[in-house]
Amino acid sequence: MNRLLTLHKDILERWRRHFAKIANEEFAHPDIPWNAPVLGPTPKIEDQEVVSAIKSMKPSKATGPDDMAAEIWKKDDSVTSKWLADLFNQVIKENKMPQDWNHSTTVPIWKKKGSPADCSCVCIYVCSF
């Protein structure tokens, strides 16, 4: 298990085993806090909420499958915030998410500790938007 793999099929098999293990093993995790349910209709998402979220996006981060960098969303936040707020409100109103939002790409990022052969990594899930 502690040898560096060089054949593509062996590398894929190692990752398959690793993700099968972490996806199916139970682990201790904190309790999920309970909040009182929100009664009544879902509040409308306002443009200003989206502007706030866009401004909090960190620049120079890797893009997702859509290749949209944070800088592009920030370019004219008055236009993008209106468009995004309308999109989100439509999703809420119709109670139907775009199909692409149901898929993500798992990207393992090596922690730079220990041997890469040990699969010592943090996994991020990149979603399309």
Image (spheres, rainbow, N blue to C red):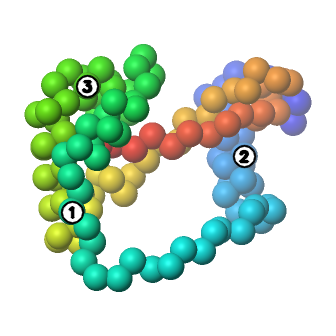
Q: Disc count in the image?
A: 3
Q: Is residue 30 visible?
A: yes
- Foreground mark, 1 or 2, reads 1
Label 2, on which residue? 18
Q: Quadrant of residue 24?
A: bottom right
Tell me the residue at 33%/53% (across/down).
101
Residue 31 in the image: state x and y as whole percent.
Answer: 71, 68
Label 1, on which residue? 44
Callout 2 amino acid: His
- Horizontally, residue 58 falls left or right of residue 23, namely left
Neighbour tally class for label 2: few under 14, some 14-19, many 20 plus, Cα within 10 Å: some
- Foreground mark, 3 or 2, reads 3
Residue 38 in the image: state x and y as whole percent.
Answer: 39, 77
Q: Going from the N terminus, do you reach mark 1 or mark 3 first?
A: 1
Label 3, on which residue? 74
Q: Is residue 12 visible?
A: no
Callout 1 amino acid: Lys
